[in-house]
Image (cartoon, rainbow, N blue to C red):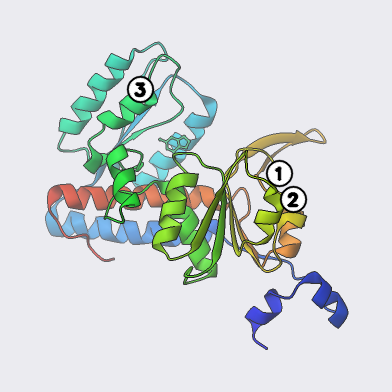
Amino acid sequence: MTAMDVTVLTDAARASRGTPPAAGALIDGRAIAAKLRDRVRGAAKLLATRDGFVPGLAVVVVGHNPASEVYVAAKKKMAAEAGIRSTDHRVPASASETDLLDLIHGLNEDPRVHGILVQLPLPPQIDGHAVIAAIDPGKDVDGFHPLNIGRIASGLPALAPCTPLACIELAKSAHPSLAGLDALVIGRSAIVGKPLAQLLLAEDATVTIAHSKTRDLPAAARRADLLFVAVGRAEFVSGDWIKPGATVIDVGIHRVTRGGRSRIIGDVTFEEARKVAAAITPVPGGVGPVTIACLLANTLKAACALAGLPQPQA
Ligand code: GUN
């Protein structure tokens, strides 16, 4: 019997053999992200020495949202460490859509800028779709532009959204091939669930998207070899929803206060799920750091494509 056979035993089978349920292996997002960032840093260094060329990322922040500030600070720090020059573009919360569109048009024209990231959410007076559509698709390192979304759906090369890319990277750390596996994506958002389903299809997984109207969601979850949870509800998925031996990727991030202590948790009830899954991402330390690493990889890719340079293999 191989190690893989052991992890796919059901709890009933384990009990009959006197084997305790397997504790799920942690998928170490921080380590996976560090390796990816190292590759980006190596490639950026080669670009700088070979071509005298530094990839540039413009980070646009509208207003002051404490959560956005934390994400943006992390993105900028990681960019600097990877040899990507990031510039900050602050817009007041009272700005009009036209103000923001003018800024985007300027960044589209700026040859030092290869990636444009508009941190979401935006204030209500600004139509996020219009802003994303105004970004040059070649600089759309968030992969949110309709052209990139459409190219992904058509199976064409594109800048893909970073969180779905991170989910694939994490799943492949547990299963080098996703071909033929039953994947369930819980959540149908335009920036995670839908593009993730497309990327999974491109990996030849058998894909289902579940959402708030799905009937018997726990039963659907129990059929999944790969379970991706992006619903934005703290501890929405409990341990008894998980197929023994499944791989669980938790996209949620929630700050909660319990027993007077503040903690970050995900969309999955981690301790329960870990007892059933073969592999699971923690929160924090799972999808989050890999998402930022994918943003850096997208910026490098966009920069090389815009400059007509081959992407260095570091
Ligand atoms: N806000 C929350 N997640 C994201 C993301 O991936 N990109 C941007 N631009 N804003 C976000």
Q: Amino acid at mark 3?
A: Arg
Cβ–Cβ below 8 Å for labels 2 and 1? yes
Question: Which dot, 2 or 3, sits closer to the camera?
Answer: 2
Residue 235 badge:
1
The answer to whether residue 83 of the structure is visible from this angle is no
Residue nearest the viewer, comparing 170 with 92: 170
Q: Amino acid at mark 2?
A: Ser
Residue positioned 39% across, 15% down in the render: 92
Estimate how packed mark 3 is, as few (under 14), some (14 to 19) or many (20 or more) residues with alpha carbons within 10 Å: few
Circle 1: element type: loop
Residue at image mark 2 = 238
Q: Which of the two discs, 2 and 3, labels the residue nearer the N terminus?
A: 3
Estimate how packed mark 1 is, as few (under 14), some (14 to 19) or many (20 or more) residues with alpha carbons within 10 Å: some
Q: Amino acid at mark 1?
A: Glu
Residue furthest bottom in the image: 1
Residue at image mark 3 = 90
Residue nearest the viewer, comparing 257 with 152: 152
